[in-house]
Image (cartoon, rainbow, N blue to C red):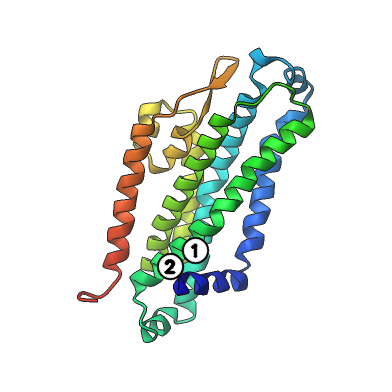
């Protein structure tokens, strides 16, 4: 945990927390913007219109648009400090290998993402209540989506840490994040079979709400596919982090 605490101190210097808070507020506000239209207000007391499912779908779209870029920026900033400040050498002098250092970075990011994503979801729900949705909310799809969004964000943080550690130019990692945001949003419009073969497509795969024509309703996410992707990505991260260390370390 000493390595994680050190990474937390680096986050304060890198202004990671204000960036994360700002994005959480932006996603919450943008996800809820549609609530204040006249058409949306007409559905607030109509269970058949599924106003909470519609809000969750809007939230899913905004999260898919921002999460790949967020994870790229967080991981890149957290790793770039080692390139710019000769941190790899300093860490080695303290007995920490590059793999151990990157592992601590991932754990630290996982710790701060948990409350951030939970608060983000809570803010969207709170705005829905304040806006006047009177239909009772089904908490299960919201909780499921929040957990899955957190898991995906941690996975992509790990993948971006590996990329940022391997490639010193951080524009590469951030550029991949921008591309990922585009693919994640576009995947919401693609057939499910196509989304499942695109890594960022899983931001669409985890959706707990879907649209068929003009109707919006809760849907069942393909948990077997999601589990398989997460396990495969975790294996890639574990092997990648291990291979950052010198042979025999």
- Closest to the observer: 194 or 48? 48
Q: Position of residue 59 (x, y in %)?
A: 61, 36
Q: Tell me if mark 1 has few (under 14), some (14-19) or many (20+) residues whose alpha carbon lies within 10 angstroms of its own.
A: many
The count of marks equals 2
- Closest to the observer: 176 or 17? 17
Residue behind mark 1: 108
Quadrant holding the C terminus: bottom left
Q: Tell me if mark 2 has few (under 14), some (14-19) or many (20+) residues whose alpha carbon lies within 10 angstroms of its own.
A: many
Instruction: Name the secondary structure under disc 2.
Output: helix
Instruction: Name the secondary structure under disc 1.
Output: helix
Give residue 61's mark.
none
Residue drawn where x is 63% and y is 62% of the image: 17
Residue drawn where x is 62% and y is 56% of the image: 20
Quadrant holding the N terminus: bottom left
- Closest to the observer: 221 or 196? 221
Please, is residue 23 above or below residue 217 in the view?
Answer: below
Give residue 104's mark.
2
Q: Position of residue 179 (x, y in %)?
A: 47, 47
Question: Which image quadrant for residue 246?
Answer: bottom left
């Amino acid at each position: 945990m000493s390595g994680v605490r050190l990474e937390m101190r680096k986050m304060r210097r890198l202004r990671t927390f204000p960036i994360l808070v700002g994005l959480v507020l932006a996603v919450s506000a943008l996800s809820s913007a549609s609530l204040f239209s006249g058409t949306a207000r007409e559905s607030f007391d109509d269970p058949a219109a599924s106003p909470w499912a519609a809000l969750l779908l809007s939230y899913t779209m905004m999260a898919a648009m921002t999460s790949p870029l967020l994870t790229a920026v967080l991981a890149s900033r957290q790793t770039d400090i080692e390139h710019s400040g000769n941190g790899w050498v300093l860490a080695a002098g303290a007995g920490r290998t590059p793999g151990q250092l990157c592992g601590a970075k991932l754990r630290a990011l996982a710790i701060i993402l948990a409350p951030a994503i939970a608060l983000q979801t809570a803010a969207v729900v709170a705005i829905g209540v304040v806006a006047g949705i009177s239909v009772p909310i089904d908490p299960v799809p919201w909780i499921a989506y929040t957990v899955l969004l957190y898991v995906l964000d941690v996975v992509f943080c790990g993948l971006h840490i590996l990329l940022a550690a391997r490639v010193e130019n951080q524009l590469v990692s951030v550029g991949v994040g921008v591309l990922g945001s585009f693919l994640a949003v576009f995947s919401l419009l693609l057939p499910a079979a196509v989304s499942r073969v695109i890594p960022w497509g899983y931001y669409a795969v985890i959706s707990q709400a879907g649209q068929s024509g003009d109707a919006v309703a809760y849907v069942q996410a393909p948990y077997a596919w999601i589990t398989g992707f997460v396990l495969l990505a975790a294996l890639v991260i574990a092997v990648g982090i291990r291979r950052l260390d010198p042979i025999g370390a």
